Amino acid sequence: MEERNAQTALVTGATGFIGSHLVDELLAQGWRVRALVRPTSNLQWLPEDRVEIITGSLLDPACLKACLEGVTAVFHVAGAYRARSLDAYRKVNVEPARLILQTLTALAEAGGRSRSDTRFIFVSSFAACGPSPDGTPLTEKDPCRPVSTYGQSKAEAEKIILSFQDRVPVTVVRPPGVYGPRDKNFLVVFK
């Protein structure tokens, strides 16, 4: 547990359903947690006395640099699951990932390293791969065939993220539908 105490995580989307539960788990494991939140974010699920809150934008390079300095891992959970257009999805689901990875790369280079030591974990979606064409379970080696603009934006983000894997240690996670306490989306389905 002592080694974990030295680790700091940046969590984007920390005020959301998945992100707030991730923050709880990281804190329980002894991590220091930093959360980048929008000025309009509802902080009800964040224990502000235990989380370093930074108010800013995922599209602001100066803000990202300040957030990323000294972190061990970035859990990039922020994203939009509803938007009016593919461009609107890209602004939230694609561009921030690119900017975070560019910033991590620049910080490594400024430190005289060719590769970042900070792990980047991206919470994508099952929608990025799309349905199986023949019902056979898909693997990460199968081509993406998203059927929605949301899925397309997540697939595009994954492609960009993987293009950085020689400079930043990256992991892409594709959860299926997620529900539980604090969830507001699946609750409607169950009702």
Image: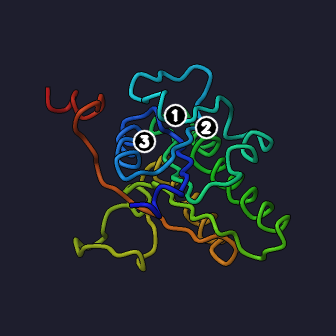
Element type at marker 3? helix
Name the residue tied to disc 1.
83
Q: Amino acid at mark 2?
A: Ala
Q: Where residue 145 appears, x then y in whole percent?
A: 44, 65
Relative height, residue 96 to residue 63 (above, below): below
Q: Quadrant of residue 38?
A: top right
Q: Where, quadrant-wise, is the N terminus in this rendering?
A: bottom left
Q: Which residue in the structure is indicated by mark 3?
A: 19
Image marks 2 and 1: residues in contact by CB distance under 8 Å = yes
Specify whether 57 is left or right of 187. Answer: right
Query: Which residue appears at 35% of the width and 76% of the height?
Result: 139
Neighbourhood count class around disc 3 (C-alpha, 10 Å): few under 14, some 14–19, many 20 upward: many
Q: In the rendering, at what x and y percent does residue 144 appear?
A: 45, 68
Cα gap from disc 3 to disc 2, whole angstroms: 21 Å
Residue type at mark 1 is: Ala
Among the 4 quarters of the image, the one containing residue 114: bottom right
Q: Is label 1 in a helix, a strand or a loop?
A: loop
CA gap between label 2 and label 1 equals 6 Å
Nearest-to-viewer mark from 3 and 2: 3
Picture residue at 57% right of the left edge, 61% below the top? 120
Label whose residue precedes the other's in the sequence (3 or 2): 3
Q: Nearer the viewer, residue 78 or 75?
A: 75
Q: Is residue 71 left or right of residue 148?
A: right
Q: Cβ–Cβ below 8 Å for labels 3 and 1?
A: no
Amino acid type at image mark 3: Gly
Residue appearing at x 75%, y 59% in the figure: 102
- The circle on residue 144 is none
Give the x, y percent position of residue 189.
Answer: 19, 32
Q: Is residue 114 above or below residue 44?
A: below
Image quarter hosting the C terminus: top left
Viewer-closest of 11 and 17: 11
Q: What percent of the width, then of the height, locates residue 71?
A: 62, 54
